[in-house]
Image (cartoon, rainbow, N blue to C red):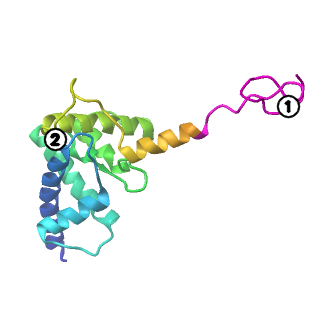
Amino acid sequence: MGQLDAQDARKRWAEEAYSVLVDVARKYHAVITYKELAEEIQDRSGIRTRILLHNWIGPVLGRVVHEAHRRGDPPLTALVVHTDDGMVGAGYKEVLETAGHPPVDGVEERERHAAEARLACYRHFGATLPAGGGIAALAPKHQAAIERRRGHSEAPPPVCTSCFVELPVTGVCDSCA
């Protein structure tokens, strides 16, 4: 692909990405992975590449960020998450910059911002929402990881202060009682 051809491909992919993301936004709490999005926009455009995904998807999504902002639409790129952890990518900072917002502090704040942006997308693009208008939610895979971590960080079981053996559910030590 020559330079002009690469620019034309990115432009076409960005147009298709916008359309795909509007479709995703029409389903409450839906997200799409970078890989799924890449496959879909290549299929729809008929323009395929063998270049590694992380080397071309960022500039394509950057175009989507700017187009959504120009149209007054919420940031559709909040709907795109990593396959492995369900989080938006580091490039999400472009959403904040384009909207004139200050950068966020840390990954969890970025994820909360993206969750709010996704809810705005669902509302704006006509997803069927529950009574009350719905709630902002972390992407399912990321939420599941948080819940797993919480499960592992439970307080240790109580221990007898005399013999240091774990107490039974009665709370009375079988050895010392």
The secondary element bearing badge 2 is classed as helix
Q: Main secondary structure of the magenta part?
A: loop
The structure residue drawn at horizontal position 29% and vertical position 39%, both measured from the top left corner, is: 96
Can you say whether 25 is above or below 124 in the image? below
On the image, which quarter does residue 59 sit in? bottom left
Q: Nearer the viewer, residue 41 or 151?
A: 151
The structure residue drawn at horizontal position 70% and vertical position 33%, both measured from the top left corner, is: 156
Can you say whether 103 is above or below 8 in the image? above
Q: Position of residue 94 (x, y in %)?
A: 28, 45
Residue labelled with disc 2: 69
Q: Which mark is residue 129?
A: none
Span colored in magenta:
152-177
Q: Position of residue 42 (x, y in %)?
A: 18, 67
User: From the image, which quarter does the N terminus lie in?
Assistant: bottom left
As for residue 170 lying within the magenta part, the answer is yes
Mark 1: amino acid: Phe
Q: Position of residue 31 (x, y in %)?
A: 28, 48
Q: Position of residue 34 (x, y in %)?
A: 30, 57
The structure residue drawn at horizontal position 21% and vertical position 25%, both measured from the top left corner, is: 131
The secondary element bearing badge 1 is classed as loop
Direction from residue 94 to residue 107 in the image, left or right: right
Q: Visible in this render: residue 137? A: yes
User: From the image, which quarter does the C terminus lie in?
Assistant: top right
Nearest to the eye among marks 2 and 1: give it: 1
Residue labelled with disc 1: 164
Direction from residue 29 to residue 105 in the image, left or right: right
Task: Please tell me how many numbered marks the rendered image carries.
Answer: 2
Mark 2: amino acid: His
**How far apart in space, not on screen, are marks 2 and 1 (Cα)?**
61 Å
The structure residue drawn at horizontal position 47% and vertical position 45%, both measured from the top left corner, is: 145
2 or 1: tag closer to the N-terminus: 2
